[in-house]
C-alpha cells in the first residue's frame, strides 16, 4: 500500500505540470517528452526508495530543523514551470530557444536526474526534511563515495534545465531562487551532520566535495 501511494505522487505531480504547461503553451513534442522524463524519474525514485523508510524518503518529517524549505522549494519549482510555459507559449518575454537547445536541456535532466534515483536507492535516510532520524547512520557507498550531497546536485541541475527544456530563459529567474534555497539547505545539512551524526566529520575529511566535484 505504501509503495502504491508513493507511486501515485509522481504521477499526480506530472498531471499538475501537464495542466500548467497546457495552460501556458501548446504541449509540443519536446514538452511532452519532458513530462515523460519527469514521470519516469519520479516513478524510478519511488521504486528505488527503501521499504523501511519509504514515507520518510518521499514525504519527509514534521521534525525538520529547517521548516518550510520543502514547501518553498516545491513552489519555486512550480513557479519555474509556470513562468517557462507562459513565456515560451503566450507572452514571449525572452527570446525563443531552438529545439536543439531544448532537447539538450531534456538530456541534461535525464542524465542528472539519474543520480537522484541512485541516491535514494543507497541511502534509506534520505529525506526532504532536515533532521537526524532515530536510527540514522552514515552512508558512504554509491554516489556518496564521490560527493557528500549527490541528491542536491541533481536538484541544482535539473530545475534550470527544466526551464530550458520548456523553451524559456525567463523561467531561469525562479530557478535561480531555487538554486539559492538548495545551496543554503546543503550548507545547513552539512553543519547538522558534522555536529550530530557519528563519523560524518571523518567522512567529510575524506570526501571533500559537497556538491560540485572539484569545486565545492
Image (tube, helix red, strand yellow):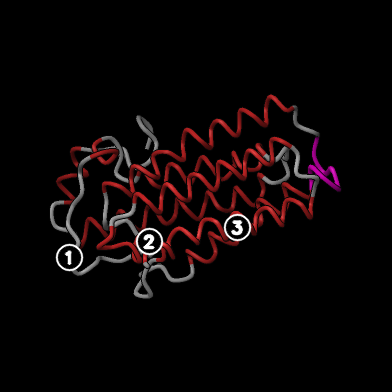
The mark lying in front, picked from 1 and 2, is 2
How much space separates mark 3 and mark 1, taking CA atoms?
Answer: 32 Å
In this picture, which residue range is highlighted in magenta?
87-95
- Mark 2 secondary-structure assignment: helix
For the point 17% across and 57% down, which residue is it?
Answer: 137
Seen from the viewer's position, the closer of residues 173 and 34 is: 34
How many marks on residues?
A: 3
Q: Which mark is residue 3?
A: 2
* Relative to 59, residue 208 above or below: above
- Mark 3 secondary-structure assignment: helix
Q: Quadrant of residue 114?
A: top left
Residue contact between numbered discs 3 and 1, judged by CB atoms under 8 Å: no
Q: Classify residue 18 as left or right of residue 196.
A: right
Quadrant, the N terminus: bottom left
Q: Which mark is residue 177?
A: none
Q: Quadrant of residue 17?
A: bottom right
- Name the residue beneath numbered marker 1: 135
- Name the residue beneath numbered marker 3: 76
Quadrant, the C terminus: top left
The mark lying in front, picked from 3 and 2, is 2
For the point 19% across and 69% down, which residue is it?
Answer: 134
Amino acid at each position: 500500500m505504501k509503495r502504491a501511494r508513493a507511486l501515485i505522487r509522481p504521477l499526480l505531480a506530472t498531471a499538475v505540470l501537464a495542466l500548467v504547461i497546457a495552460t501556458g503553451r501548446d504541449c509540443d513534442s519536446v514538452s511532452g517528452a519532458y513530462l515523460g522524463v519527469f514521470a519516469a524519474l519520479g516513478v524510478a525514485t519511488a521504486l528505488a526508495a527503501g521499504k523501511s523508510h519509504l514515507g520518510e524518503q518521499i514525504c519527509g518529517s514534521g521534525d525538520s530543523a529547517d521548516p518550510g524549505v520543502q514547501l518553498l522549494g516545491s513552489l519555486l519549482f512550480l513557479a519555474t514551470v509556470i513562468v517557462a510555459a507562459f513565456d515560451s507559449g503566450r507572452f514571449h518575454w525572452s527570446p525563443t530557444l531552438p529545439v536543439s537547445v531544448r532537447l539538450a536541456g531534456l538530456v541534461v535532466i535525464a542524465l542528472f536526474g539519474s543520480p537522484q534515483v541512485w541516491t535514494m536507492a543507497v541511502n534509506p535516510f534520505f529525506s526532504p526534511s532536515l533532521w537526524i532520524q532515530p536510527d540514522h547512520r552514515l552512508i558512504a557507498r554509491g554516489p556518496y563515495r564521490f560527493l557528500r550531497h549527490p541528491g542536491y546536485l541533481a536538484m541544482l541541475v535539473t530545475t534550470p534545465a527544466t526551464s530550458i527544456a520548456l523553451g524559456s530563459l525567463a523561467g531561469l529567474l525562479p530557478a535561480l531562487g531555487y538554486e539559492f534555497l538548495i545551496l543554503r539547505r546543503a550548507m545547513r545539512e552539512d553543519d547538522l551532520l558534522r555536529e550530530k551524526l557519528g563519523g560524518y566529520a571523518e567522512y567529510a575529511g575524506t570526501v571533500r566535495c559537497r556538491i560540485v566535484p572539484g569545486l565545492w
